[in-house]
Image (cartoon, rainbow, N blue to C red):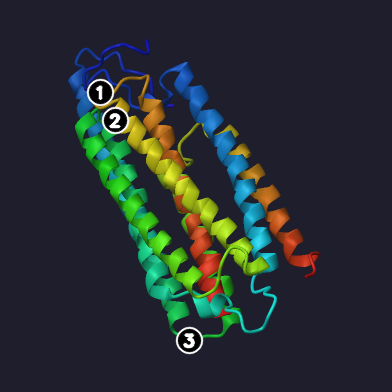
Amino acid sequence: MTNQQSNSANPNLNLEYRRKQNAEEMKHQVITFTMMIFFTLIAFAMVAMESISRWFIIPVILLLAAIQVIFQLYYFMHMKHKGHETIALFIYSGLTVGLITVLVFLTIVWL
Amino acid sequence: MHVEEKFTDATWPAAPETATLEGKNKYLGFWLFLGGETVLFASLFATYLALKDKVPDSGMLLAKDLYEIPLTFAMTMILLTSSLTSVYAMYHMKNNSFQKMQTWLLITVVLGFSFLALEVYEFNHYVHLGHTFTSSAYGSAFYTLVGFHGAHVTFGLMWFLSLMLRNAKRGLSLYNAPKFFVASLYWHFIDVVWVFIFTVVYLMGMVG
């Protein structure tokens, strides 16, 4: 965790460095956002072009959604930072149970 | 570090949301809640997928007759952008600039309300076409899933607004920084759920 303060005699020097670091991180977030918008555009464009087979479209848009969610979790929600091991356990347990639920409802539910 | 300690820009911690034990606990506990929310939404998705297009008589509208690209696209862009504006708010929180954080949160809230307005319009439109909560199993599953997400958006907006109003004159402290941070995590999670809704419900619904 980066919450320890330095013991530097001039805290302003440290401040300048941290500001630069934060600005750098913000730049990465904007790049992440641009990529998310790009993936969304691809997904919508594929559906708008009615000529493509649904057996191709569906796996591709699901993959694009998965990539977007990874971006959200690891960049916007900071899971790429250190100290997120327990958090990863929580969210992946939730995802596992969720995936099994979806799988069950898609296979053994008949209506 | 003490919760009510007064900070300058130089002494403000780099990670104010986890600088106190209370903040750390809040952060961890909130992710546990998000794990549970994942299961909740997954079960609603599962129900929707099992009941999609299950209607009692063949004249009723199905997914591919109802959904339209422009509206879903607009809602998606608005919610995705609001995710970025809340990242900007947290960027300013880490730089100890309270007013800038409040401004970006306000932009986030405005975008959230526009999203909600479009959703209300959409539901109203469907109801007039005869696709209601009680018209079919498909209708029930659709409104439960998308409506649950809409309720989360509403709750997130109320959460942001209460934090902004309550702390308007207090400024940032290690007491409220974790609160702002956790609310922004909740907002990102709402966006995560929407990514699956626009893909699984709308886009896959339009493809057929």
Point out which mark residue B165 bears.
2
> What type is the residue that disc 3 sits on?
Glu
Q: Nearer the viewer, mark 3 or mark 2?
A: 2
> What type is the residue that disc 1 sits on?
Gly
Determine whether the residue tagged by mark 1 lies in a helix, strand or loop: loop
The 10 Å Cα crowd at callout 3, few under 14, some 14 to 19, many 20 or more, is few
Q: Mark 3 — residue?
A: A50
Q: Mark 1 — residue?
A: B171
Whether tag 1 and tag 3 are in contact, CB under 8 A, the answer is: no
Horizontally, residue B186 falls left or right of residue A11, namely right
Q: Earlier in the sequence, mark 1 or mark 2?
A: 2
> What type is the residue that disc 2 sits on?
Leu
Residue B16 image point, x, y percent? 36, 25
Q: Chain of mark 3?
A: A
C-alpha separation, residue under disc 1 versus residue under disc 2: 11 Å
C-alpha separation, residue under disc 1 versus residue under disc 3: 53 Å
